[in-house]
Image (tube, rainbow, N blue to C red):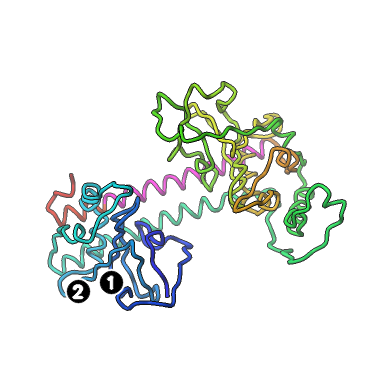
Amino acid sequence: MKYIRITDFDDDGIVPGNVFTTTENVEDRYRLDDGDVLFARSGATAGKTFLFSSDLGPSIFAGYCIRFRFDRKKVLPEFIYLYTKTNRYQAWVRSIQRPSGQPNINKAEFKSFTIPVPLSDVQDTLVSEMEGAREARRRKLAESDALLASLDPFVLERLGLSPTGALFARSYAATLKDCWARCDPDYHSPRFKELRRAIEASGYPVYELGRLAPNPRTGFAAGREAQSLSEQEGIPHVRPLNITRHGELTFEGTKLVPRDSVDTNDILRMNEVLLNNTNSTEWVGKTTVFEGQRQCCCSNHITRMTPERSLVVPWFLAALLNAMRWSGYMGLLATNFVNQAGINTETLSALRLPIPSIDEQETIAAELTRRRSVARQLREEAGREWEAAKVRFEVRLLGGAGAE
């Protein structure tokens, strides 16, 4: 039986790819029925909601959720759930939650929230309109996600490096000579050898990364002093979380380090390629390009590289490294330790990569930029249209109060 926790759902339902915790010992009072609405009562997302459908299969809910079960003769659960997406409900959540330790809202407070309930046919109409808007939003977000997911395969296909998925042997032999420098199994796996052979046979000139970007170096570690500085007092400290899964730089959640502690050489330079050198095996190697939006430095989990522009375009190099991460190449190359994987500058410098002409690199980079731009536009449109739908819902229901 599935165990529904706060972390299993977001504002739009079950998180894609979610793996549920399961349990066998169940008390009937915690079982979920079709149409039950769960309210998160604590944590950073206190107030978020989830509408349970029996399509999910037998389930129970966790203690950090509060379940409400509604009389369908009086109100549609779908109407209540969609009402919790309105600006009025979100404003109430912000006003009522207590930030002691972590935000929380108790059952009595949720019960005190008033909801205008129109006639059933009006509820049906409002639910239908909102569900249509949600579905349109999902389609645009899915289209955006598909474009971003296509970036890495596109790069590998253009270079003739598309992984076959073969040669995942459970056991294999390696010579003592080959193991002299490294003896970890992944490094000598048939999968790694297949990728290496494909690189050498790509038909393009192959360079070591140390030739493409000489003298790579890492940033520096920062302690708790990076937690509560103002923009005047500190400089953004780029960390692994600031590089997205699709190789873009984000300043969301950026920590700051004291300005007077940052040496001139620690300031990031325009068009430096930034690679996440320490992370989980899946994400080690994600890469972006610093374009100088603001003065920044970076952590020791980021490797800084200055591309040799006569050989390689920065955004192409970043794209190729991201594609190598996606293919599993970086994970195989990395040294793995407890819950982490890492690639040091020596290993990176020895990494061999196929490099087409500058013209072809720029063509590839331009196509990637186009896809990113379209994906971003789709997400922005989806957000605007969903917000407009919520306003229409409130205006229809509240007679204009929701438009404020």
The residue under label 2 is 72
User: Where residue 90 appears, x then y in whole percent?
Assistant: 25, 51
Does the residue at mark 1 contact the one at mark 2 (Cβ under 8 Å)?
A: yes
Work out which quarter of the rendered image holds the N terminus and state it: bottom left
Q: Is residue 191 above or below residue 94?
A: below
Work out which quarter of the rendered image holds the C terminus and state it: top left
Q: Is residue 382 left or right of residue 281?
A: left
Which of the two discs, 1 and 2, labels the residue nearer the N terminus?
Answer: 1
- Element under label 2? loop
Q: Is residue 144 left or right of residue 273?
A: left
The image quadrant that residue 58 belongs to is bottom left
Q: Residue at x 22, y 64 (%)?
A: 79
Q: Residue at x 30, y 54 (%)?
A: 46
Q: Nearer the viewer, residue 289 or 385?
A: 289
Residue 35 has which mark? Answer: 1
Q: Which residues are magenta?
A: 359-388
Magenta span includes 113? no
Secondary structure mostly seen in the magenta stretch: helix
Q: Residue at x 36, y 55 (%)?
A: 137
- Element under label 1? loop
Disc 1 from disc 2: Cα separation: 9 Å
Graded by Cα atoms within 10 Å as few (under 14), some (14 to 19) or many (20 or more), the crowding at tag 2 reads: few
- Three-letter residue code for mark 1: Gly
User: Where residue 28 appears, x then y in whole percent?
Assistant: 32, 78
The tally of labels here is 2
Q: Is residue 157 left or right of residue 172?
A: left
Q: Nearer the viewer, residue 99 or 73?
A: 99
The image quadrant that residue 170 belongs to is bottom right
Magenta span includes 373? yes
User: Where residue 60 appears, x then y in whole percent?
Assistant: 36, 72
